[in-house]
Image (cartoon, grey):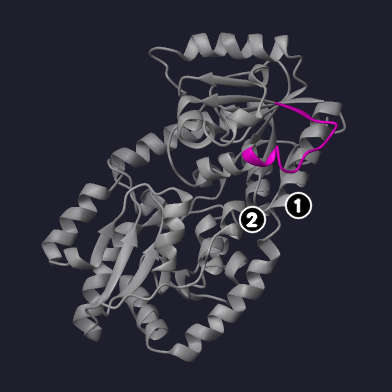
Amino acid sequence: MRILINVTNARNVGGGLQVAVNFVKHTTVFKRPDIEWFYAVSETMDSVYLKEDFKPQIDADHYFIFPNQPDFKHSFCRVQKQLHELEEAKKINVVYTILGPNYHLFNIKEVIRFVHPWVVTSNQYAWSNIPLREKIKMKSHIILLKYLVKKKKYVITQTNAVRDGLIHQVGLLPERIKVVPNVLPAIFNGLDNTHVENDEGWIDVASVGAGYHKNLNIIPEVIKLLEEKFGLKNMRFHVTLPEGALGLDDINERVKELGIEDRFINHGNLRQQQLSELYRRCNYCFLPTVLEVFSASTLEAMYFGLPTVATDLPFNTEVFKDSCLYYTPMNAEEAAVKLVELSSNKKLADNLKDKMKERLSIFRSFEDYYNSTVDFLEDVASGKVK
């Protein structure tokens, strides 16, 4: 069976792209003799992640590089034509678009991995957290995404909540949706996760992610409350917002206004090796997100043993269970109270660490994740899934 992995739209560093990289690389690790893989990759994917250690392992007639998509002004139509030629010339049986849905269409069956939280699992907190202009754009984008998902027909997603939304809000057939829960990125399993102490007296908190749905704009208020209500001036927060990220200018302005520049550190985009070093130097994790499907940050916090304060929402409680402290979304004072409770109670922190280890054991097998995904691709290609 011939499967084409389509990651031509992999252009931004982030959690989704890391998932795509992990899956692509493991097609040469968990080999299946009945599968012949072909790869349609973006220039970013090739040059940043695959060129040195993956590409040399692959035959040239199985690996194809395209301009980053979508690029409607210059290359979109040309790439669409080339993708059609590729699927026909290589007699592809099914396409797997990991960062789905993309805007290109295929003549054969296409399975997309869909994890866009706004489409079927959005909530009042998320909508109230974005400016009016962005809200209008998002609502329009959701209409387009629903149309594309329905047109693609076959979906792999991470939770039953999303599956139910795709059935009832988008109209997909239940048998065409495969739930494959997220797992710890395989690269972390080989990385050192021992904590590195700093000798400057700081309490370091990791708060990884980007986008309005992460609600990182709450952090300046939390920092100020920690100082004014609890006299805690040595807790600093580490974020990974890329240059030009939504809301970053507003956050920076608020940080300066409050005079807390020393307690808010933005590292920008980090690759997984760099991210692991950041985690090792942190004491705790803060996850203020108000909208998610299944955040990799939860599993990463578990792996690096970072007791966590997170929003009391289903996508967190389903994963963490009782291994985390929760606060009401968008309530900065309650978040500050939980962080103080965590940092002042070593017994509590150690207890959470033990529980996190137990929870993480459920999400450790990338091989199971990989094989469940490939099994579904085969079932779609062979017609077992109609």
Label 2: element kind:
loop
Stretch in magenta: 25-37
Amino acid type for the residue under numbered disc 1 = Asp
- Residue 258: x and y in percent read 14, 66
Residue located beneath label 1 in the image: 368
Residue located beneath label 2 in the image: 183
Is the C-beta separation of discs 1 and 2 under 8 Å?
yes
Q: Residues within 10 Å of mark 2 (few under 14, many from 20)?
A: many
Query: Which is nearer the N-term, disc 1 or disc 2?
Result: 2
> Is any part of residue 124 visible from this angle?
no
Query: Is 136 on the left-hand or right-hand side of 184?
Result: left
- Residue 220: x and y in percent read 24, 65
> Is any part of residue 73 visible from this angle?
yes
Quarter in which the C terminus is drawn: top right
Query: Is 265 on the left-hand or right-hand side of 380?
Result: left
**Picture layout, residue 246 above or below residue 385:** below
